């Protein structure tokens, strides 16, 4: 995920751009290996679906039933694509 | 992707080792420590993992016919982290840790209420090639939340035994140990799930997809999930204003408990050591040995152990707060503020602890993963007002505002604030000079709120107390002996007090005995050093007698009050900041007849003690936690310079404004 070319900046939508209540899917994570490994352990990694619970500082997302607080400087490096509410798997809410 | 290949390499290495230990592994907040406490009870010990700051709790446990050592590994989210405590734990699990037995089996605790993410870690643990037994914890909570887990199907997916347990109640523990014994006897290594076995490399995405598949097939939903309470509480506790207010309220509550709950046991400990010292003094024949034990060792050790009740109370509170889930929210709230001065949000637990004692605080700074972040936190922790400074604050308050509790309270608050402001400023400065990096940004799990476990909190307090005694105890003993020697030698001529002189002393309110003690201290190495440093400390408004106090309290700041008591001829009894000592200090005069303790001198003295690093045990702990004497030396040097400069500015500044 680290080696992928950065997507077109104009189209990039980061976790920071998401609003509270929004569902999204992680497309890519542009952070150094140790930080992305830790985030992956918390459930924030490529392909995961999450709901943005609070878009404050820190940003709070709900992923696999737990809430994770993420500093906005990190959230800004996590690219996501918004998901329509119904398309999200039920696992997100568990 | 290099991590993935390293993983498989690690797995093949690990399959060669077969140790005797059993290691408990899980995500943080999955109930691993509760399970550990259930299994080992009070029989556990905390030992340092050689060459690191990692303290491992372990205890004997009967598994099958063998007694094995059960290790409580630190909570892990991933086995791919390359730094910090986690790295060490990962090495230990793979049997590559020097000086630590390799695991014969791993007990993997999975939180039934949060299965997908827990299975992500499981996918990495299964790769290690060590027999694994899964303890499926919090089954009761999962059922309350409306889910049931098909244990047999889960076993089939994981390829290892799964035992449902409720760690809080201890149910399922016997069966867990039995199954663990069987797994070890059979040498049952888990078979990597098919989805993962054939993949090369195994990506995080794949691990999560596998976890989702497993959960989809084992989870039986009985009623819809909820979580409104957590959301509502979070909305308030993470709010920029409401969260901050709650944080200060909680802080105030913890401080209140530290000072109220702990005061009675502190008095008892103080009294017990006082009586012990007197009793030993009366039992042993007079001489250097009696003096060493009764005046050196016992009061020295007692003077530090007296802080034990506060440390226990503090860690009891922290454990309760952590258990409820509040601590993670507090870290989020203060992260916004601390980050501005270059400290990570997680530094707040150590900073809170430092208001009781810097030693456990420095040890608590291990929660900060990043090495640089941790170093800066450790360096500034001793600036926070610890309990040992309180006798000095009390003395100065009594000197300056004997009749005004309100002004006294204001002075106390100002003293606390100065320590905190100095700590934050120094962190800011170090971030721009010493360690030029920004703190690692916050990423933290916000666990569901739940009722705390008093048993876990009591055990946490007990653990911290033991650690404190062991870490501080050895150093304190050595320091007490050196200090006693400095204050007792060389012996001056035994003064013979004539009846007339005794009478004139008595008129001044000094007993002949206290007068001798005063003369002896003046004659000792400490007394001479006081004279030697007088030119250096004169610009701060101090005379040689205060110099003796500073020299005597060099290794432990609280000693200054009793040292001043002796040097002003009040005897040891004045150590409690009694009115006798205050009267004597107020009456003290310089050679030219002007009072010693003027307003400016008092303020300068207070400022000095707020900022000075006068605690040898703390330096020893700093060395241990940073791994280098140079950081301990640096800490001592910068705090001494800071204290001297600030006291100088305070004294000279006040004089410029005509206040002396």
Image (cartoon, coloured by chain):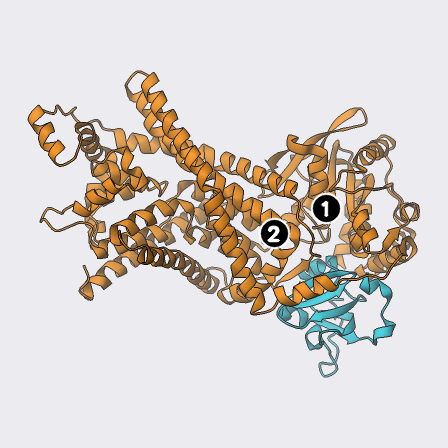
Which is closer to the viewer, label 1 or label 2? 2
Q: Position of residue B90 (x, y in %)?
A: 70, 46
**Left or right: where does residue B384 sit relative to residue B15?**
left
Residue hosting label 1: B31
When asked about the image quadrant of residue B492, the answer is: top left
Question: Is A4 rendered above or below residue B314?
Answer: below
Q: For the residue labelled by badge 2, is the local secondary structure a helix, a strand or a loop?
A: helix
Is residue B18 or residue A47 the one in the foreground? A47
- The quadrant of the rendering that contains the N terminus of chain B is bottom right
Residue at point 16%, 35% (across, down)? B509
- In the picture, one chain is orange; tell me its letter: B
Residue B64 position, x and y percent, is 81, 27
Q: Position of residue B32 (x, y in %)?
A: 72, 44
Q: Name the residue: 91% across, 49% down.
A: B150
Same-chain status of marks 1 and 2: yes
Residue B529, given in percent of the width and then of the height, sits at 23, 40
Residue situated furthest left in the rendering: B500
Q: Label 2 marks which chain's residue?
A: B
Which image quarter is the C terminus of chain B in? bottom left
Please count the marks in the image.
2
Q: Nearer the viewer, residue B574 or B25?
A: B574
Residue located beneath label 2 in the image: B321
> What colour denotes chain A?
cyan
Can residue B624 be seen from the camera position used here?
Answer: no
């Amino acid at each position: 995920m680290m080696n992928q070319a950065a997507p077109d900046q104009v189209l990039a939508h980061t976790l920071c751009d998401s609003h509270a209540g929004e569902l999204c899917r992680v497309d890519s994570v542009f952070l150094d290996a140790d930080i992305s490994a830790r985030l992956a352990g918390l459930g924030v990694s490529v392909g995961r679906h999450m709901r943005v619970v609070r878009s404050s500082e820190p940003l709070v997302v709900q992923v696999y039933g737990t809430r994770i607080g993420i500093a906005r400087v990190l959230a800004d490096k996590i690219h996501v694509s918004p998901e329509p509410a119904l398309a999200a798997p039920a696992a997100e809410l568990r | 992707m290099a991590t993935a290949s390293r993983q498989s390499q690690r797995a093949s290495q690990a399959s060669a080792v077969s140790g005797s230990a059993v290691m408990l592994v899980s995500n943080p907040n999955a109930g691993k420590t509760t399970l550990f406490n259930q299994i080992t009870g009070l029989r556990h010990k905390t030992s340092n993992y050689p060459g690191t700051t990692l303290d491992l709790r372990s205890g004997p446990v009967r598994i099958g016919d063998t007694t094995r050592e059960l290790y409580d590994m630190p909570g892990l989210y991933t086995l791919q982290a390359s730094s910090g405590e986690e790295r060490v734990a990962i090495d230990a699990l793979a049997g590559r840790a020097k000086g630590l037995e390799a695991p014969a089996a791993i007990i993997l605790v999975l939180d039934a209420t949060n299965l997908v993410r827990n299975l992500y870690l499981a996918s990495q643990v299964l790769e290690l090639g060590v027999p694994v037994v899964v303890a499926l914890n919090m089954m009761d909570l999962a059922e309350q939340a409306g889910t049931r887990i098909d244990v047999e199907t889960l076993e089939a997916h994981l390829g290892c035994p799964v035992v449902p347990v409720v760690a809080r109640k201890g149910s399922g523990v016997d069966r867990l140990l039995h199954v663990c014994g069987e797994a070890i006897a059979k040498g049952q290594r888990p078979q990597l799930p098919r989805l993962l076995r054939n993949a090369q490399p195994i990506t995080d995405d794949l691990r999560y997809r596998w976890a989702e598949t497993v959960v989809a097939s084992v989870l039986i939903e009985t009623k819809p999930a909820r979580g409104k309470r957590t959301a509502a509480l979070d909305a308030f506790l993470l709010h920029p204003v409401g969260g901050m207010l709650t944080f200060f309220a909680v802080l105030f509550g913890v401080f209140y408990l530290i000072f109220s709950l702990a005061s009675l046991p502190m008095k008892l400990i103080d009294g017990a050591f006082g009586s012990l010292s007197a009793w030993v003094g009366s039992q042993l024949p007079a001489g250097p040995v009696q003096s060493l034990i009764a005046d050196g060792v016992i009061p020295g050790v007692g003077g530090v152990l007296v802080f034990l009740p506060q440390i226990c109370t503090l860690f009891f509170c922290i454990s309760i707060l952590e258990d409820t889930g509040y601590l993670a929210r507090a870290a989020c709230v203060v992260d916004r503020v601390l980050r501005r001065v270059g400290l990570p949000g997680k530094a707040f637990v150590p900073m809170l602890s430092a208001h009781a004692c810097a030693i456990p605080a420095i040890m608590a700074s291990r929660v900060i993963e990043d090495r640089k972040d941790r170093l800066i936190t450790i360096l500034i922790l001793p600036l926070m007002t610890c309990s040992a400074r309180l006798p000095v604050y009390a003395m100065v308050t009594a000197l300056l505002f004997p009749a005004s509790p309100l002004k006294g309270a204001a002075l106390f608050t100002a003293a606390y604030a100065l320590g905190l402001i100095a700590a934050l400023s120094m962190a800011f400065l170090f971030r721009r000079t010493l360690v030029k990096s920004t703190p690692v940004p916050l990423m933290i799990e916000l666990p569901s709120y739940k009722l705390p476990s008093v048993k876990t909190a009591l055990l946490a307090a007990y653990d911290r107390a033991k650690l404190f005694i062991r870490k501080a105890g050895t150093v304190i003993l050595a320091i007490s002996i050196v200090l006693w020697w400095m204050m007792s030698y060389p012996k001056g001529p035994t003064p013979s007090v004539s009846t007339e002189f005794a009478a004139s002393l008595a008129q001044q309110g000094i007993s002949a005995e206290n007068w001798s003690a005063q003369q002896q201290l003046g004659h000792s190495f400490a007394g001479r050093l006081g004279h030697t440093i007088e030119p250096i400390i004169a610009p701060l408004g101090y005379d040689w007698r205060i110099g003796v106090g500073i020299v005597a309290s060099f290794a432990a700041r609280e000693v200054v009050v009793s040292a001043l008591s002796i040097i002003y001829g009040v005897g040891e009894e004045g150590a409690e900041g009694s009115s006798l000592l205050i009267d004597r200090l107020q009456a003290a005069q310089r050679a030219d007849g002007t009072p010693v303790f003027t307003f400016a001198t008092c303020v300068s003295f207070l400022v000095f003690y707020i900022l000075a690093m006068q605690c040898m045990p703390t330096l020893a702990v700093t060395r241990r936690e940073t791994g280098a004497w140079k950081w301990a030396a640096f800490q001592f040097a910068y705090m001494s310079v800071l204290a001297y400069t600030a006291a100088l500015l305070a004294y000279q500044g006040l004089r410029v404004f005509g206040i002396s």
